[in-house]
Image (cartoon, rainbow, N blue to C red):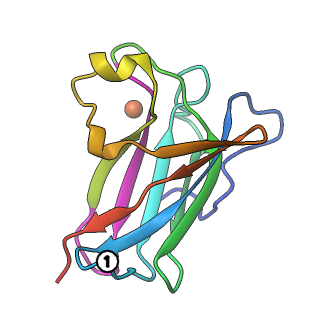
Amino acid sequence: MSPERAELIEPGMAGQPIELIGFVLTRTCKGVPGALVDLWQADAKGDYDNKGYRLRGHQFADAEGRYRFRTVVPAEYPGRTPHLHVKVQPKGGRVLTTQLYFPGEPGNRRDGLFRRELLIRTTKNEGWLAGRFDFVLETR
Ligand code: FE
């Protein structure tokens, strides 16, 4: 399991910083407190850390179902447009494994796995990107 942390950016790390926030919600738009959100990604060169936990971390959604990460925008790597890997799991529930994408990336059109519904909404914010994505889970 990855480290429990919201801060994936480390000193000196290259790349466009992004704060990604959002909610884990049920289909009736109720927050899912304590849901696991586990994120892993390539760095600004398109490389994964396969030895350690760089750019990997997990959080548990707060009482309202909110989660938050600070990371960098990953680069594309051969065959893939930039993306974040995410696992979301309500307490004791089924794991949702998915990927999130970035708007305006030319590679989105060429990547067969890309899905428009999985785009992060981003706005520029003084050197940072503010990103928003809400997960909607099928829960009972
Ligand atoms: Fe990947």
Q: Where are the magenta residues, as a range?
A: 80-95
The residue singled out by tag 1 in the image is 29
The residue located at (59%, 30%) in the rendering is 43
| Residue 90 shows in the view | yes
Locate residue 99 relative to residue 129 in the image: left or right.
Answer: left
Magenta segment includes 68: no
Frontmost residue, 139 versus 54: 139
The total number of labels drawn is 1
Instruction: Specify the farthest residue to the right.
Output: 11
- Which x, y percent locates residue 97? 29, 52
The residue located at (49%, 63%) in the rendering is 22
Element carrying mark 1: loop
Residue 101, picture quadrant:
top left
Label 1: how many Cα within 10 Å (few below 14, some 14–19, many 20+):
few
| Residue 54 shows in the view | no
- Which x, y percent locates residue 104? 46, 26
The residue located at (60%, 41%) in the rendering is 52
The residue located at (44%, 45%) in the rendering is 120
- Quadrant where the C terminus sits is bottom left
Residue 90, picture quadrant:
bottom left
Is 74 located above or below residue 118 in the figure?
above
Locate residue 60 relative to residue 30 in the image: left or right.
Answer: right
